[in-house]
Image (tube, helix red, strand yellow):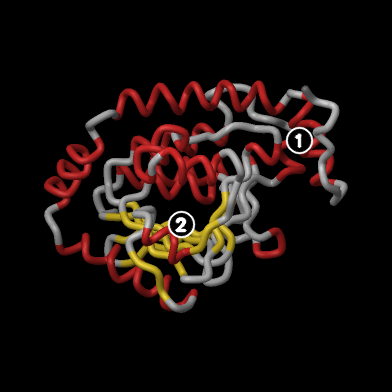
């Protein structure tokens, strides 16, 4: 288990907190592996009725740790990041997210696979895949155009445009936008604890039915995106973009046709 994950249990609720504040909760391979392990175990644990994913009251996650990513990029569907994606995708119980501050890259796309999402009004969500010479991941290229329409999804995925917690709520990505980080965590916890009072099998069946339409198509898209994402990580464009990020400069794509 990664030292940058905090796990708490209370009244049937398992809270999974990404805790790496000095790096804005940037996700490492060890964190992905640990989160996958927690989800797999929680799915099998009858005492767990729901999972709450958070990064605390000031930051959700700034996405992948770029240095970790450059050192050991994911090479296949067995990589740690895909283990986490698979565990969340297959999770049969309710998943609630509390989002404060930055939610970058997978910090946004993982919300598309949660059941309830609560955000602070000033949260900043962003999917800068193209900006880094990469491509969308975790089914976002399928889910977002269907949820938002092609034009708005294109702003988010082709331009990497950021959006707020209020916008995420208006667009149906989140359930409610709250005034502060503390309020967001409190609301998410309140809603997650409600599942302790509900019939667990009925909840699981209802989630399965809601997720069933298009599920296999979504699974194929996630795998296709993952394979292309791995290829793009080794592309000259991505190498330039990630190097520029580490060097704190603007990438130069002028030489790429």
On the picture, is 77 further left or further right than 168? right
Within 10 Å of disc 2 (Cα), the crowding (few <14, some 14-19, many 20+) is many
Q: Quadrant of the C terminus?
A: top right
Residue occupying image coordinates x 21% and y 41%: 210
* Residue closest to the eye, 98 or 237: 237
Whole-angstrom CA distance, mark 1 to mark 2, is 26 Å
Image height check: is 219 above or below 170?
Answer: above
* Residue closest to the eye, 3 or 149: 149
- In the picture, residue 227 is in which quadrant? top right
Image height check: is 220 above or below 88?
Answer: above
Residue occupying image coordinates x 32% and y 56%: 116
Disc tally is 2
Residue where numbered disc 1 is placed: 70
* Residue closest to the eye, 36 or 60: 60
> SS at mark 1?
helix
Residue occupying image coordinates x 28% and y 51%: 94
- Where residue 117 appears, as percent x and y from the top left, is 37, 58
- In the picture, residue 39 is in which quadrant? top left
Residue where numbered disc 2 is placed: 16
Q: Are marks 1 and 2 in contact (CB under 8 Å)?
A: no
Question: Is residue 90 visible from the viewing direction of this image?
Answer: yes
Question: Is residue 5 visible from the viewing direction of this image?
Answer: no
Residue occupying image coordinates x 25% and y 38%: 211
Image height check: is 215 above or below 190?
Answer: above
On the picture, is 54 further left or further right than 159? left
On the picture, is 54 further left or further right than 68? left
Name the disc covering residue 208, or none: none
- Where residue 253 appears, as percent x and y from the top left, is 80, 33
> SS at mark 2?
strand
Within 10 Å of disc 1 (Cα), the crowding (few <14, some 14-19, many 20+) is some
**Is label 1 or label 2 in front?**
1
């Amino acid at each position: 288990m990664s030292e940058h994950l905090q796990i708490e249990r209370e009244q049937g609720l398992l809270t999974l907190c990404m805790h790496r504040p000095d790096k804005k909760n940037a996700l490492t391979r060890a964190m992905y592996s640990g989160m996958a392990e927690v989800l797999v175990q929680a799915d099998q644990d009858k005492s767990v009725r729901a999972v709450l994913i958070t990064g605390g009251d000031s930051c959700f996650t700034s996405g992948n740790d770029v240095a970790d990513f450059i050192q050991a990029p994911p090479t296949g569907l067995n990589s740690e990041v895909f283990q986490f994606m698979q565990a969340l995708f297959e999770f049969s119980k309710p998943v609630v997210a509390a989002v404060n501050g930055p939610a970058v890259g997978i910090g946004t796309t993982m919300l598309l696979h949660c059941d309830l999402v609560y955000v602070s009004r000033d949260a900043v969500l962003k999917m800068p895949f193209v900006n880094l010479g990469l491509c969308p991941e975790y089914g976002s290229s399928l889910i977002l155009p269907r949820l938002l329409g092609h034009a708005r999804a294109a702003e988010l995925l082709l331009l990497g445009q950021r959006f707020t917690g209020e916008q995420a709520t208006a667009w149906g990505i989140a359930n409610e936008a709250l005034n502060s980080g503390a309020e967001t965590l409190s609301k998410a916890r309140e809603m997650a604890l409600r599942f302790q009072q509900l019939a667990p099998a009925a909840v699981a069946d209802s989630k399965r039915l809601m997720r069933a339409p298009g599920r296999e198509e979504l699974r194929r898209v996630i795998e296709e995106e993952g394979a292309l994402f791995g290829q793009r990580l080794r592309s000259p464009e991505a190498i330039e973009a990630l190097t520029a990020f580490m060097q704190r400069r603007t990438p130069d794509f002028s030489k790429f046709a």
